Amino acid sequence: MRFVWLLFALLLAGGIFLYLNPEYRSRLLSSTSDMISPVSTSRIYKWRNDKGEWQLTDTLPPEGVTFETLEHRSDENVLPRPPQLDKHK
C-alpha cells in the first residue's frame, strides 16, 4: 500500500512541477512529438505555365520548362509571418 501512495505522490509532484514550469512542459511535449512523428521532407516544383501563372506541383513540370525545386520539412511553417505579429519599431 505504501508503494501506491509513493507512486501517487511522485505523479502528483511531477504534475505540479510541469504545471508551474510551462517552458519545460512545452519542451518536453515537443521532444515527445518528435519521437511520435519523425520529420519528413517534401519536394515541390515551382514553375510558370503558358499563361504565366505560378504552378506548385509534386511532379516534374513538362519537359523544357524552367522550374525551381523547393524542399520543405514537416516541422517548419511555410507561410509568411503575418504583419500583425511583427514588432513595431
Image (cartoon, rainbow, N blue to C red):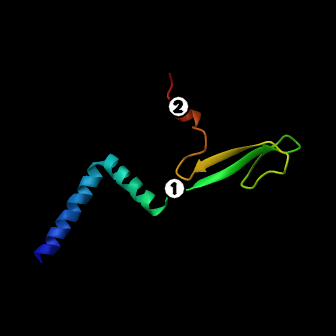
Measured as percent of width and height from the top left, residue 2 is found at 10, 74
Q: Secondary structure at mark 1?
A: loop
Residue 55 placement (x, y as % from top left): 78, 47
Tell me the tag on residue 86: 2
Percent across and percent down for residue 64 are 85, 46
**Mark 2 is on which residue type?**
Asp
Q: Left or right of 6: which side holds 17?
A: right
Amino acid type indicated by mark 1: Val
Indicate the position of residue 12 as horizontal and vertical percent values: 22, 62
Query: 58 above or below 11?
Result: above
Q: Quadrant of residue 54?
A: top right
Residue 9 occupies which quadrant of the picture? Answer: bottom left
Mark 2, other Cα within 10 Å: few <14 / some 14–19 / many ≥20: few
Which callout, 1 or 2, points at the residue further toward the start of the chain? 1
User: Mark 1 = which residue?
Assistant: 39
Residue located farthest toward the bottom when viewing the structure as drawn: 1
**Residue drawn at 15 percent across, 71 percent down:** 5
Task: Name the residue rendered at 18%, 69% in the picture.
Answer: 7
Q: Is residue 70 above or below residue 33?
A: above
